[in-house]
Image (cartoon, coloured by chain):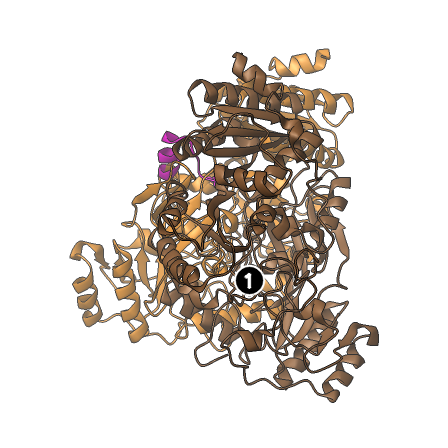
Chain colours: A orange, B brown
């Protein structure tokens, strides 16, 4: 073993200087943006400083944002308005306590359901329904379909593209009260639950049985599985366990007209129309409202390690990924990267610093998760020895102890928080072919060289999934910066066949730029499906895809 | 280490007696049924002995089966018939050599495209088209849509439910000539190819780059990826890598009217309408014809081991599975089981015998695949030591050497071949909750106790996926045996919420029993999608789902 590697393995890289925030101790409301695992979407107008409106961190905290209807150039669809008769009907189906009615026509008192977590969009729904059963959802939907009342399905309201809150006065159907874990099959690891179960709570229950969710994201403390599946949430574990399209093996959902479609198979292999359940994975509540799910859950790893490594070039970061896949194989569970500018901004605004003494243009965080601590460590150390010898890695540190693991994750997770201190953040969540992943960061830097409106351009993200979080900061929002970013960045992404939304989805905010990632024919097929499955267009209107002539 | 375990690890169980057939050396045409990895479906009428009609193994080999139109009570849909003008059009789009025309009205000369591999169904298509480009597929489909000509998309024609051949005179669109691997991304492991690429050939190309397909099945020598994806093929590696719904990350397909829908993203995370591509996964060519695919391919394992173990009860088989998942964790790649009756029939008709000296009611085959031989062996040995000590395993043998691994796989794979020697085989491919998996075998035995029409009832299968291959043999086909099996078995399966088709799909043969695994509402939604996406009903008619009033 080289002296350099020995130093790395002994943790000589100043790890103790890192802050010790618990990785999974996400705030109850929403930790997604704060964690930096999923970046925030672009705020569409200048007025909203990026940040949770309920957090109290910023001057305008707790001040509700302007109504979406006033901020965006969008017309209300030709839907009915909720009448007292409708309310009476809802109260005949649900307990009165589960029919929440607003104080005023602007949805006063229902802000928790009308405003998104980022505080960038605000509907004015005057009624929130909290059904407890699928049958209740069905009765409510049938009524809304007959009355042509628009509906906004809502889970934990942790979405980042304005998909989970009403745009106008849509009836909110919250899955908050549908939170029973129905079954965890000891043999198959298949977990069946209602749509409103909170990710972190399910994960904790699974851990008792030696299992884990195949999904992990910063908002785990409040996001709900129904919403996760509806938005095809990505997150950290995708590299290891794949997307929800593969791990969700059954779903029960309610169509716009109230029809209950039960494809809640618990069979890993059920080849009798497996594409049906897929319709509600990633269609963001526009084709059906998910009421129950069956998810294949992998065994809980018995050992976890994290390495934080310095690379002298992005080419090294790329090749190191290849080596990690080949050598760590089945135990590789995360491969994240950040550039030196991320470490600078962390150093400037937070108590978090790199665990390494030396500086480098790029840093990589590798996580392993396996069933044997000794084997995993041996694989990791061998991999590090090789990659240090062949020059891919210049310096590094490895942690196996939970507190040190958390300290390293902090470096990756607190970037978003640090960036906010710069002032305004223009945030993008895109996928790119790996060799191009950093080109866009450099091109963005060139674009704003000498521009006073931009303080810094940083790149970090889920490298293993080709998912870049590109962030541009400035002292304040500037329209000319935004105009220089868009559509230039969408075009850049489209030219290399990347995705303009890697994991956050389309929602309300990206509906009109979907064409940069989908062909006209694909968008037309989406519209055809929508029109067929929801002829009145009542399910989550103004989101995902526009039906020609529709709202 | 116990003396017993030492004996097991030293291969004391008579492994040398096993035949040494190469596991991957599937015959060029089709090895699916012969390999036993996927069992054959029920022959719908008495006349067809189960077995490949082209194989020459049986007396009636090379005799084409009767026309489906004559054997089954099914009416031809209201489609146009192919005229000379149509042929002229096809020849204007494709090279003449790629427009194959039959010798007669019964499809003479085109048997390879008209008859399924099992020799149980036979169409009478008079024209087979072999486009080379997506644009050609589009032009052909547009024409067929305008003319209301029915179409049967066909890949390797290895399907087992009559889904891949015409029922009447549908135009066959073969993907045989669309077999280019477009790209293998070194960094991400994402492989992009045309739909007609043969699974085994792709796997071999991937191996050169240290990758593998996330799919493996007996027919790999001739099945094509387009067909695999269209039928959501399951196979052996599903336990490890999940279903194609997760691993297929992009698809290009042609709709019934010729529209090309390109969702061929190579991004692991692309959340801009991810449900679109899912429509062609498992819809068996009824919603669109797949022309290109992007598939996420995992690293090729560096080490493989196989254990063959004896268990004294099905409860032990069940608990052993739980232990295997917990202790082998990320390296567990197959968990197959067979009962003692399988070993009996192997002994009676083939040269293959159990590698163990002792007899047991149940046998389990466990495969591990990982990145470090020493680590994998250590995990496997520790697991065996534990499970022998706690009595779950009574005897066993382990192989790490390729020839010995193949010999053990033979025991599992040659069951289907052995069963055929009994005479007629009633074959079922179902999924059941694991604790119920063997109950149905025992119930079937009870049902036929003392019945001369039944020689034996055996159970084996992909235990790790809850996938049972239930096989009943008799000297010859008997209607009363069949009447006693169906719908009894479908009801049995439905009562425990199992699947009547674990991995083979619905195709032509199971369309009318889909209701045992899907609710009326789910089937109606399938019909609605079909009607919307293919209003003329020309794409693979008579298969998957019946549109009310349609053929």
Please report the bounds of the magenta region as a residue range. A201-217
Instruction: Between residue A417 and residue B452, name the one nearer to us.
Output: B452
**Figure check: B316 above or below A389:** below
* Residue plotted at (58% across, 60% down): B49
Q: Is residue A337 above or below residue B398?
A: below
**B392 or B7, which is in the foreground?**
B7
Q: Image check: B170 left or right of B467? A: right
Q: Position of residue A465 (x, y in %)?
A: 61, 43
Q: Position of residue B485 (x, y in %)?
A: 40, 58
Q: Is residue A392 magenta?
A: no
Residue B13 appears in the figure: yes
Q: Is residue A289 left or right of residue B30?
A: left
Which x, y percent locates residue A104?
Answer: 24, 62
Classify 10 Å Cα crowding around label 1: few (below 14), some (14-19), many (20 and above).
many
Answer with the quarter of the image where residue A93 lies: bottom left
Note whether B227 is above or below B241 in the view shown: below
In this view of the protein, which residue sits in the foreground, A276 or B122? B122
| Residue that numbered label 1 is attached to | B161
The quadrant in which residue B210 appears is top right
In the visual, does B486 lie left or right of A331?
A: left
Q: Please tell me which residue lies in front, B220 or B148.
A: B220
Left or right of A123 in this view: A5: right
Which residue is painted at 62% across and 66% down in the image? B164
Q: Residue A264, located in which quarter of the rendered image?
A: bottom left
Residue shown at 65% from the left, 77% from the top: B124
Q: Is residue A459 visible?
A: no
Q: Is residue A212 magenta?
A: yes
Percent position of residue A472, x then y: 60, 45
Mark 1 lies on a secondary structure that is loop
Q: Mark 1 falls within which chain?
A: B
């Amino acid at each position: 073993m080289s002296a350099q590697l020995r130093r790395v393995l002994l943790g000589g890289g100043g790890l103790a200087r890192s802050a010790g925030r618990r990785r999974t101790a996400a705030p109850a409301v929403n930790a997604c943006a704060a964690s930096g695992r999923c970046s925030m979407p672009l705020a569409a107008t200048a007025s909203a400083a990026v940040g949770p409106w309920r957090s109290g961190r910023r001057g305008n905290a707790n001040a509700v944002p302007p109504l979406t209807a006033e901020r965006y150039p969008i017309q209300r669809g030709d839907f009915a308005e909720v009448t007292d008769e409708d309310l009476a009907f809802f109260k005949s189906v649900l307990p009165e306590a589960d029919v929440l009615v607003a104080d005023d026509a602007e949805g006063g008192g229902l802000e928790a359901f009308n405003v998104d977590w980022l505080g960038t969009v605000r509907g004015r729904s005057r009624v929130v329904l909290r059904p407890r059963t699928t049958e209740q959802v069905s009765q409510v939907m049938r009524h809304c379909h007959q009355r042509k009342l628009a509906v906004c399905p809502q889970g934990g309201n942790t979405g980042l593209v304005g998909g989970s809150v009403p745009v106008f006065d849509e009836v909110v159907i919250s899955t908050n009260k549908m939170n029973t874990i129905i079954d965890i099959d000891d043999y198959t690891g298949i977990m069946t639950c209602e749509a409103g179960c909170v990710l972190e709570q399910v994960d904790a229950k699974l851990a008792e049985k030696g299992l884990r969710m195949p999904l992990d994201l910063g908002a785990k403390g409040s996001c709900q599985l129904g919403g996760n599946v509806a938005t095809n949430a990505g997150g950290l574990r995708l590299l290891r366990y794949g997307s929800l399209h593969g791990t969700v093996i059954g779903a029960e959902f309610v169509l716009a007209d109230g029809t209950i479609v039960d494809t809640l198979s618990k069979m890993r292999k059920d080849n009798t129309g497996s594409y049906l359940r897929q319709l509600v994975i990633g269609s963001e509540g526009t084709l059906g409202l998910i009421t129950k799910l069956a998810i294949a859950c992998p065994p809980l790893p018995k050992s976890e390690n994290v390495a934080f490594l310095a690379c002298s070039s992005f080419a090294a970061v790329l090749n190191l990924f290849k080596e990690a896949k080949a050598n760590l194989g089945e135990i590789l569970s995360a491969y994240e990267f950040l550039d030196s500018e991320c470490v600078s901004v962390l150093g400037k605004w937070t108590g978090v610093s790199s665990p390494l003494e030396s500086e480098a243009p790029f840093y990589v965080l590798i996580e392993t998760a396996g069933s044997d601590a000794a084997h995993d460590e041996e694989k990791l150390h061998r991999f590090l020895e090789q990659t240090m010898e062949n020059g891919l890695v210049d310096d590094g540190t490895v942690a196996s102890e939970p507190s040190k693991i958390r300290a390293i994750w902090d470096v990756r997770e607190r970037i978003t928080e640090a960036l906010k201190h710069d002032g305004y953040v223009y945030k993008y969540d895109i996928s790119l072919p790996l060799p191009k992943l950093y080109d866009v960061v450099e091109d963005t830097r060139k674009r704003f060289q000498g521009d006073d409106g931009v303080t810094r351009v940083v790149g970090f993200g889920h490298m293993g999934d080709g998912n870049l979080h590109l962030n541009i900061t400035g002292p304040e929002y500037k329209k000319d910066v935004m105009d220089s970013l868009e559509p230039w960045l969408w075009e850049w992404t489209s030219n290399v066949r990347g995705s303009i939304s890697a994991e956050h989805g389309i929602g309300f905010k990206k509906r009109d730029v979907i064409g940069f990632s989908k062909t006209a024919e694909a968008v037309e097929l989406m519209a055809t499906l929508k029109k067929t499955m929801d002829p009145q267009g009542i399910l989550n209107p103004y989101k995902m895809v526009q039906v020609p002539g529709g709202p």
